[in-house]
Amino acid sequence: MKALVIDDSKAMRMILKKMLTEMDFEVSEAENGLAALSLLETGPRPELVLVDWNMPEMNGYEFVRAVRSRPEYDDMKLVMVTSETQADGVDRVVEAGADEYVTKPFTRESLAEKLGLLGFPRS
Ligand SMILES: [Mg+2]
């Protein structure tokens, strides 16, 4: 299975890549929503996308909106990685079209649990 990690923090991308690789995903990376959209145009289609909320160029909210406006991407599961703890933040994630969200900081276990809810096999 393929996963795409989108985050402007290189450290965060490394953490997520390690966790997802341990869960048997083949992981690619992008540093913002815009870079991720062009990667989707040219590269292999990931089954799972983890996208940070706060990023320059194009943030996670805008990325999710853009992906959900494209029917050919309907099968991709989108997980928002957010530091927002307010209820309205979570509402906006769902409204934008994300399938799930994880709140920083999170553990490999809590991430695996969310991915399990989306139907990805536990490893
Ligand atoms: Mg960020």
Image (spheres, rainbow, N blue to C red):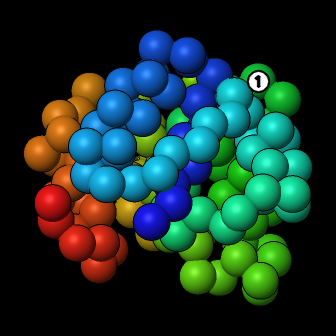
Residue 115 is drawn in which quadrant? bottom left
Q: Nearer the viewer, residue 83 or 41?
A: 41
Residue 84 visible to the viewer: no
Q: Is residue 34 above or below residue 74?
A: above
Q: Is residue 26 left or right of residue 107?
A: right
* Label 1 CA crowd tier, 10 Å (few <14, some 14–19, many 20+): few
Residue pictured at 26% horizontal, 27% vertical: 105
Quadrant showing the N terminus: bottom left
Name the foreground residue: 76 vs 93: 76
Q: Residue at x 31, y 54 (%)?
A: 24
Amino acid at dot 1? Pro
Q: Quick check: can you spot residue 13?
A: yes
Q: Quadrant of ligand 1?
A: top right
In the image, residue 68 above or below residue 107: below
Q: Position of residue 15 (x, y in %)?
A: 36, 25
Q: Residue at x 67, y 58 (%)?
A: 64
Quadrant location, the C terminus: bottom left
Residue under label 1, please give it: 56
Helix or strand or loop: what does disc 1 sit on?
loop
Q: Position of residue 91 (x, y in %)?
A: 46, 59
Q: Is residue 56 above or below residue 122?
A: above
Q: Is residue 57 left or right of residue 74?
A: right
Q: Residue at x 81, y 77 (%)?
A: 70
Q: Does 44 sit left or right of 22 as displayed?
A: right
Residue 101 percent coordinates (x, y)? 38, 53
x then y, percent, for residue 38 = 87, 49
